[in-house]
């Protein structure tokens, strides 16, 4: 579209030619069109809060929350790992706080289970033994787990092969453990030996 250069209304004539629907409303329609386009442009340029993961020259230091344009955040900062949107930071903090709370509740319940195990009488397991004093079938960690009837991460030692009194460490998880007394008796007729 070429505006008439000799006319003082060259820009207006060009806009009227480019936007014929608004042209029927005259100059007021063009002003309205220009203002709505400007408002839309300004709305798109809103600042966005991001948490800087690294020092960014001219923007801020690591750990600071700064305002940047959405395009700069979306196309440079976030893909390169220099920043994280604060909406995600808030969500991560909320989830982390909930997990910490759940973990502390779980740890407290595990501590009470550990106290019950340590204060209890322990386990008494009866097995056949050989003539040499060893058990025919050793007691495994799974046997202790079954006798106690609780879920746990690990048991040390994981194998008991002799008759007598043994102390077993039960790891319940989350850094909570208990020492349990296990008494192994024999069903062999020569158990007195």
Image (cartoon, rainbow, N blue to C red):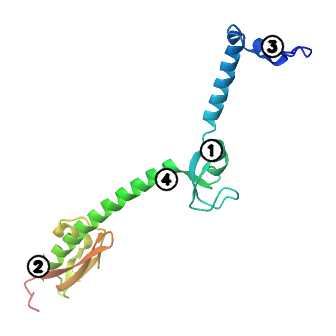
Q: Nearer the viewer, mark 4 or mark 3?
A: 3
Q: Is residue 163 visible?
A: no
Please tell me in which quadrant of the rendered image residue 150 appears: bottom left
Q: How far is disc 2 from disc 4 in space, using C-alphas?
A: 49 Å
Q: How far is disc 3 from disc 1 in space, using C-alphas?
A: 39 Å
Query: On the picture, is 88 further left or further right than 167?
Result: right
Name the residue nearer the viewer: 33 or 99: 33
Mark 1 or mark 3, which is nearer the start of the sequence? 3
Q: Which of marks 2 and 3 is in front?
A: 3
Residue at (64, 44) in percent of width and height: 69
Residue position for label 4: 89
Q: Is residue 108 depicted above or below 125 in this figure? A: above
Residue 26: x, y in percent? 71, 10
Mark 4 or mark 1, which is nearer the start of the sequence? 1
Residue position for label 3: 13
Q: Is residue 42 depicted above or below 49 in this figure? A: above
- Tag 2 near tag 3, CB within 8 Å: no
Q: Which of marks 2 and 4 is in front?
A: 4
Q: How far is disc 2 from disc 3 in space, using C-alphas?
A: 99 Å
Mark 3 or mark 2, which is nearer the start of the sequence? 3
Q: Rate crowding at label 3 as few (under 14), some (14 to 19) or many (20 or more) other CA atoms within 10 Å.
A: some
Name the residue nearer the viewer: 128 or 177: 177
Mark 1 or mark 2, which is nearer the start of the sequence? 1
Q: Nearer the viewer, mark 2 or mark 1?
A: 1
Residue at (64, 38) in percent of width and height: 45
Q: Rate crowding at label 1 as few (under 14), some (14 to 19) or many (20 or more) other CA atoms within 10 Å.
A: some
């Amino acid at each position: 579209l070429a505006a008439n250069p000799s006319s003082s209304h060259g820009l207006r004539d060009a806009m009227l030619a480019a936007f014929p629907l608004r042209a029927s409303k005259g100059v007021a329609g063009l002003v309205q069109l220009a203002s709505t386009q400007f408002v839309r442009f300004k709305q798109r340029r809103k600042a966005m809060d991001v948490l800087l993961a690294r020092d960014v020259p001219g923007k801020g230091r690591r750990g600071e929350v700064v305002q940047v344009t959405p395009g700069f955040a979306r196309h440079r900062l976030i893909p390169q790992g220099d920043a994280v949107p604060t909406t995600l930071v808030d969500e991560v903090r909320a989830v982390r706080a909930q997990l910490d709370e759940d973990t502390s509740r779980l740890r407290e319940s595990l501590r009470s289970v550990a106290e019950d195990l340590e204060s209890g009488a322990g386990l008494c397991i009866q097995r056949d033994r050989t003539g040499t004093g060893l058990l025919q079938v050793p007691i495994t960690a799974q046997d202790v787990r079954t006798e106690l009837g609780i879920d746990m991460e690990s048991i040390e030692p994981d194998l008991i092969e002799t008759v007598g009194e043994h102390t077993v460490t039960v790891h319940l998880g989350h850094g909570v453990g208990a020492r349990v007394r296990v008494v192994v008796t024999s069903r062999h007729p020569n158990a007195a030996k």
